[in-house]
Image: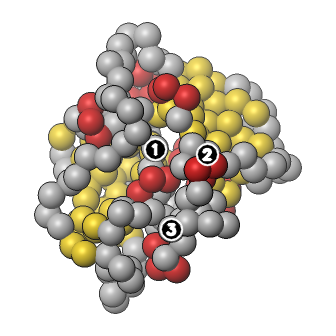
Amino acid sequence: MRVIKIKSPTRDQRVPPGQRVTKKWPVLHYGGVPEIDVDRWRFTVKGLVEKDLSLTYSEFRALPRIRVLSDIHCVTGWSRLDNLWEGVSARTIGDLAGVRGEARYAIVRSDGGYTTNLSLEDFFQEDVLFAFKHDGEELAPEHGYPLRLVVPRLYFWKSAKWVTGVEFRDSDIPGFWESRGYHNRGDPWKEERFGR
């Protein structure tokens, strides 16, 4: 297994405006924690791709891995520094499926119907990954086991828990929180918390 480390973000000041640093990792999500049977779990890729994918958990875990050292910035105002994630790069998923040129957005889908939307510019940053480990340990169910998206450059609601797949589209669809008043992008350095 080839593993690389990427430190993100590369800024002198690591804590965005309006944030306070915590060593804890608060648990925040809508609804309960789903019980997911990894023997039945599938990661699907569809939409504007050359080939649809449907991977079992063991097939997903067998893909090339990366490690990303990054900070978490939650829209509620806390930041947790130096989180080490391990998983599969979003770029690897895009390459496997062959994302078509007309695609502009990634709609990430999770257990229970949760979605989040990302431009492909944000989705394919080098530090975006589908993680199954945090700080050397398997993700706990409350933190997204068996798989969560990690998008270090944006507020943490974009890092969807319990991910089951991604759809590539030429048009945007606001995700769960975005359709409830959260900002469509969520850049913590611009304090894009609410509104368009």
Q: Amino acid at mark 3?
A: Arg
123 sits left or right of 81 in the view: right
**How many other residues sit within 10 Å of disc 3, few (<14), some (14-19) or many (≥20)?**
many
| Residue 14 - label | none
Q: Which numbered disc, 1 or 2, marks the residue that appears first in the sequence?
A: 1
**Residue bearing mark 3:** 193
The residue that appears at 27% across and 36% down in the rendered structure is 142
**How many other residues sit within 10 Å of disc 2, few (<14), some (14-19) or many (≥20)?**
many
Q: Secondary structure at mark 1?
A: loop
Q: Give the farthest residue toward the left.
A: 23
Quarter of the rendering containing residue 92: top right
**Residue bearing mark 2:** 175
x then y, percent, for residue 100:
80, 44
x then y, percent, for residue 192:
54, 72
* Placement of 188 over or under 49, stated as above or below: below
Q: Which numbered disc, 1 or 3, marks the residue that appears first in the sequence?
A: 1
Circle 1/circle 2 CB separation < 8 Å: yes
Q: Secondary structure at mark 3?
A: loop
The answer for how far apart the CA atoms under marks 1 and 2 are is 10 Å
* Placement of 187 over or under 137, stated as above or below: below
